[in-house]
Amino acid sequence: MPRYSYECPLRWFDMDVYGHVNNVTILRYLEEARVALLFRAAAEAGEDGLASGLVVARHEVDYLKPLEYRAEPVTVETWISTIRKASFTISHEVKDTHDDGTQTVYARASTRLAPYDFRTARPRRITPGEAIFLTKHMPEPSTPIATTSPAQASAQL
């Protein structure tokens, strides 16, 4: 279950004057996938603390191929790549998987997020329950993606 898959609809107004999905819109797709994982899926798993406050500390996006408008949704795969005491990094791929098994990757991205207490206007630490939920969405250590292993993530708490 490490990668969370979100089917993101494309909207006609997502296109820019060059006929492809605008780069800012790609960031919105990443946000939709993050919300689906960290708010909805986490709440379904009984862990809704992240929905009470998160702030984006950093975005990094590699735009690999133009995504052109079409009626079919694009897949945004999301997984947790690192967990620290007061922040974590979520990675994304915006892509299509074709009938023959090949993939077209339009963008790869990572976003560092920090839990935030809006009541006190201060960042906060990741709770043990949140760390358990996040760890479930990390690739196995043998996966060729730079990751923090679940054991390392628990040790950093």
Image (spheres, rainbow, N blue to C red):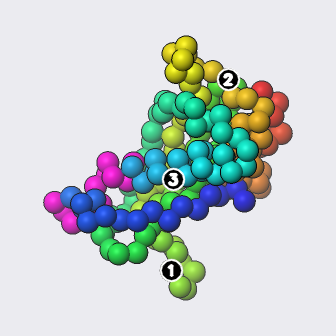
Instruction: Write down the residue under mark 3.
Output: 33
Q: Which mark, by number, is residue 125?
A: 2
- Tell me residue 89's x, y (percent): 59, 39
The N terminus, quarter of image: bottom right
In this view, the mark in front (3 or 1): 3
**Quick check: 137 above or below 59?**
below
Instruction: Write down the residue under mark 1.
Output: 98
Look at the numbered discs 1 and 2 and tell me whether their residues touch, using CB distance below 8 Å.
no
- Give the amino acid at mark 2: Arg
The C terminus, quarter of image: top right
Q: Nearer the N terminus, badge 3 or badge 1? A: 3
Mark 3 residue element: helix
**Quick check: 157 above or below 91?**
above
Mark yes or no: residue 47 visible: yes
- Tell me residue 90's x, y (percent): 58, 44
- Tell me residue 103's x, y (percent): 51, 73
Label 3 – label 1 distance at C-alpha: 21 Å
Q: Which mark, by number, is residue 13?
A: none
Label 1 – label 2 distance at C-alpha: 41 Å
Mark 2 residue element: loop
Q: Of all residues shown, which one is farthest toward the bottom?
A: 100
**Quick check: 136 above or below 21?**
above
Left or right: where 79 falls relative to 150? left
Label 2 – label 3 distance at C-alpha: 23 Å
Given residues 58 and 56, the one toward you in this image is 56
Residue at (40% x, 59% y) in the render: 64
Q: Nearer the N terminus, badge 1 or badge 2? A: 1
Which stretch is magenta?
17-27
Estimate how packed mark 1 is, as few (under 14), some (14 to 19) or many (20 or more) residues with alpha carbons within 10 Å. few
**Residue 86, picture quadrant:** top right
